[in-house]
Image (spheres, helix red, strand yellow):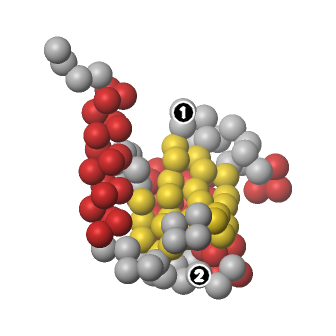
Amino acid sequence: MANTKHKLFQKRRLRVRNKLRKMANGRARLSVHRSNKNISVQVIDDARGVTLAAASTLEKDLGLVGTNNIEAAAKIGTAIAERAKAAGVEDVYFDRGGFLFHGKIKALADAAREGGLKF
């Protein structure tokens, strides 16, 4: 039986996350989720199980509600970089989940790097 798109996505997500956990070295995780309508990102401390900072296109103060394009991803990247630095986090590892590092995910990562996050 052929694998469905969702099963392939889950396999890819677990493969990426398990590889990153081996290299974490106590750093926080920058986790990205992309839906058809929105993009959200969190900085998570896995040792304590706490979200340190978050940003999403669902936030009204960013003015991006319901947008899912490269410009919105770049704005979310800069917002998460500012919020993570305010929380005292500079070194993270980038958990793209099962999403390919291309387009919106790449734009978000580049904007977060320009904002001062190191990964």
Residue labelled with disc 1 = 36
The secondary structure type at the circle numbered 2 is loop
Question: How would you rate the neighbour count of disc 2 (Cα within 10 Å): few for under 14, some for 14-19, many for 20 or more?
Answer: many
Residue at left 48%, top 82%? 91
Amino acid bearing label 2 = Val
Measuring from the top left, give residue 82's x and y in whole percent: 67, 76
**Residue 119: quadrant of the picture:** bottom left
Q: Quadrant of the N terminus?
A: top left
Amino acid bearing label 1 = Asn
**Residue 41: quadrant of the picture:** bottom right
The tag on residue 69 is: none
Please state which of the two labelled residues, at mark 2 or mark 1, is closer to the viewer: 2
* Cβ–Cβ under 8 Å for marks 2 and 1: no
CA gap between label 2 and label 1 equals: 29 Å
The outermost residue toward the top is: 1
Among numbered discs 2 and 1, the one appearing first in the sequence: 1
Seen from the viewer's position, the closer of residues 27 and 99 is: 27
The tag on residue 89 is: 2
Residue 70 shown left or right of residue 106 in the figure: right
Residue 30 shown left or right of residue 25 in the figure: right
The outermost residue toward the left is: 1
Residue at left 51%, top 66%? 46
Measuring from the top left, give residue 112's x and y in whole percent: 53, 71
The outermost residue toward the front is: 48
Q: Is residue 97 above or below residue 68?
A: below
Residue at left 50%, top 58%? 31
The secondary structure type at the circle numbered 1 is loop
Residue at left 46%, top 78%? 27
Q: Is residue 92 above or below residue 5?
A: below
Measuring from the top left, give residue 78's x and y in whole percent: 61, 69
